[in-house]
Amino acid sequence: MFMPDLLKEKRILITGGGTGLGRAMAERFLQLGAAVYICGRRAEVVEQTAGELARIGSGQISGFGCDVRDMASVEAMLDAIWSEGPLNVLVNNAAGNILARTEDLSLRAWEAVVGIVLNGTINMTVACGRRWLAARQSATVLNVSTTYAASGSGSAYVVPSAVAKAGVMALTRSLAVEWGPRGIRLNGIAPGPIPTEGAFSRLLPSKDFEELAKGRNPVRRFGTTEEFANVAAFLVSDGCTYINGEIVVMDGGEWLQGAGEFSYVGQQLTEEQWEAMRPKKKAPTSNSPRLP
């Protein structure tokens, strides 16, 4: 579908790039000739992924351990990348989510999700943006959102994610207008369910739930990481530079027939299943208050 050198001149950083959708994008961008940088909190995972993808395509890949919630860590990583040359593209993919009844969530759980999804995206976007603006360099930011944020409906049982992703969408559209005149465009992708290792199994904890989710989708299937990576490649390429401030929904038409990705689970899970899904309790400390 794409020319093999579509991204040949691009230097792209993907947060949360060691696994799942981040890894899929890294692989596709390498196939299309980009120089790719991936980062994540677990340095060993990122480095392993970079090693496994190193022989793909004509591009090059490097991995960094970085917690996007920590601005000092973000700045140190970007200094290292910029020492080799400026980025052209930032993909904010790092995320966290918890399927839980909201009253069961601790403040620490809220902070973990909002910190990664919203604060992490802000940290990365502003840190890169300041460098691009100072150099008067054109660039692209791609933010990974979700359908329950794109529809404006939110979703029960994933409230921290819904709140954080809504903030990411507001950031995307706001900066598309503010920075667009200075050569920086921002867009997003809002995917429906796409099977990935780890996160997908936590949010759809059994085959019964997977089949139920497929049944709610007009195309009766989940999306694939390859489809997602192709949309991302198009949006960060120079083939669509008139697209700015857009959130592209790719979910088979699911949200059109009913808002709230996880709202249905409240009627499906038993008390025992909810209890089994709760994070293991730790001894309370002064740093881990619970919501009132």
Image: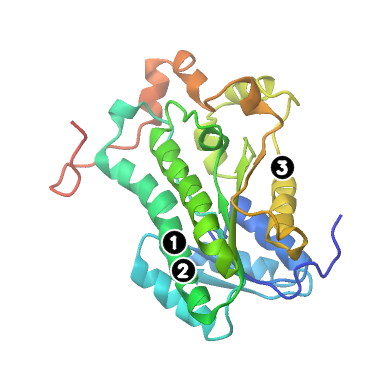
Residue sitting nearer the eye, 27 or 257: 257
Residue at figure coordinates x 20%, y 36% from the top left: 290
Give the position of the N terminus as an image quadrant: bottom right
Q: Is residue 279 left or right of residue 162?
A: left
Instruction: Give the SS element for disc 1.
Output: loop
Are dots 1 and 2 in contact, CB under 8 Å? yes
Q: Which residue is mark 3?
A: 224
| Amino acid type indicated by mark 3 | Thr
Q: CA distance from mark 2 to mark 3?
A: 27 Å
Q: Earlier in the sequence, mark 1 or mark 2?
A: 1
Q: x and y percent of residue 129 in the render?
A: 49, 69
Q: Earlier in the sequence, mark 2 or mark 3?
A: 2
Q: Earlier in the sequence, mark 3 or mark 1?
A: 1
Are dots 3 and 1 in contact, CB under 8 Å? no
Q: Which residue is mark 1?
A: 41
Q: CA distance from mark 3 to mark 1?
A: 25 Å
Q: Which mark is residue 65?
A: 2
- Asked if residue 14 shows in the view, the reply is no
Is disc 1 surrounded by few (<14), some (14 to 19) or many (20+) residues within 10 Å?
some
| Amino acid type indicated by mark 1 | Arg
**In which quarter of the view is residue 261 placed?**
top right
- Asked if residue 99 shows in the view, the reply is yes
Q: x and y percent of residue 33 in the render?
A: 76, 71
Instruction: Give the SS element for disc 3.
Output: loop
Residue at figure coordinates x 36%, y 67% from the top left: 71
Q: CA distance from mark 1 to mark 2?
A: 5 Å
| Amino acid type indicated by mark 2 | Gly
Vertical placement of 241 versus 59: above or below? above
